[in-house]
Amino acid sequence: MSSFAGVSVLDDGMLCPSTMTFVSTSSDCGYHLLVVKGYARTKETPNGQSILSHDFGVGGYRWSIKYYPNGIISDRADVVSLYVHRLDDDDGKHVEAKFSFSFVDEVEWQNPVYIRGMKTCSFSSDASSWGFYKFMKIDALERLMNLDKDDCFTIRCDIMVCNAENDAGGTQVLLPDIHRNLNNLLHNKVGADVTFEVGSDIFSAHRCVLAAQSKVFMAQLFGPMKEGSASLDVIQIKDMEATTFKALLSFIYTDSFPDMKEDEMSQATEEEAVKYEMWRQWLQNLLVAADRYDVQRLKYICEKELCKNMCVSSVASMLVLAEQHHCHRLKEACLKFIQVQSPSCLQTIIASKGWQHIIATYPSVLNELIAKVIASNQQLVLK
């Protein structure tokens, strides 16, 4: 359980002096609260510049939060960036730590599904800050947190120091980490008792780990489905790409979303645009796999990422995907996206293969879209 490591209050666009008392916890797990009051004033901070929280201590080290109201990257001023910064990084040590950012204002946002976390990071003099350049889009933050009404929100930053270099240069484990242990199992295959053949690739895994994370794997490996199988020592999967299955296994073992370097795929060059489209298709494939094996947290994350990364050329196929796999959030996002498109963009959408598939297979979706357009027009007339 995390221990309290102080609070920082940002008011009128700057750190309040009354909260500048250093708070430290001897525990290796601690959390610091960043209260943003007068959010509108923080938006006056230029792109690339941060507002620092007060220093706080966790696991014997000093930390702070870097809050970039208008993003850290010059061409992405439409996002909020959040970073954890290690202050005492001049001691030559590499500190291994995990961290996460979450909202604490709304009850529903305290669900682990909404928490932005990261795999274990190595904080050193060469890399003293780690975080999310695109923690959340500004318009999404303002809409979801109802900032027009309250103009404030609170972010909780949890830090868990996993290990650090000792004076002799070795590594001292400070806190057991179940996900790190599972990650070790995934890579060293010790005790693996089931093998999957996916295309030409072979994956070894542990029945108990898979069954604990998936009801489908539970049924397949231990339940009624097992009784109808001649052998489960080697399971062949012929309708899934190896990279997708590997990502599914990685998530089951580590509870971390596979690193696809989204920041590198969002560049404007033609080559990177192709990579970005490949990344989006990979997300769709991973969502299908997550739904097939009932890994709901992974399915939700894929759905959330797809909602943020749709375009005219992909929205129809995403709508089909949402209908096939009961992704209500993605479906609503697609319908809203279509509603606001220009006539020329609508023509492009209607001419796509995905749209023809919707007409032939899911005519009810068209009825929903028409109903939403009518309702929206009626509201405009009433105004």
Image (tube, rainbow, N blue to C red):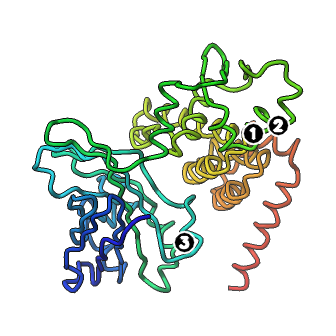
Residue 356 badge: none
* Residue indicated by mark 1: 218
Query: Three-letter amino acid code at disc 2?
Result: Gly
Q: Nearer the viewer, residue 224 or 149?
A: 224
* Residue indicated by mark 3: 144
- Crowd around label 2: few <14 · some 14–19 · many ≥20 (10 Å): some
Q: Nearer the viewer, residue 360 or 65?
A: 65
Query: Three-letter amino acid code at disc 3?
Result: Leu
Q: Position of residue 59 (x, y in %)?
A: 27, 58
* Residue indicated by mark 2: 223
Whether residue 88 is situated above or below residue 361 in the rendered picture: below
Q: Position of residue 112 (x, y in %)?
A: 55, 60
- State the residue at coordinates (29%, 76%): 8
Side (left or right) of 187 relative to 378:
left
Mark 2 secondary-structure assignment: loop
Q: Where the N terminus falls, by quadrant? A: bottom left
Q: CA distance from mark 2 to mark 3?
A: 42 Å
Q: Is residue 307 visible?
A: yes
Q: CA distance from mark 3 to mark 1?
A: 36 Å
Side (left or right) of 95 relative to 89:
right
Q: Along the polypeptide, which appears first: circle 2 or circle 3? A: 3
- State the residue at coordinates (51%, 41%): 254
Q: Quadrant of residue 321?
A: top right
Whether residue 105 is situated above or below residue 309 in the rendered picture: below
Query: Three-letter amino acid code at disc 1?
Result: Met
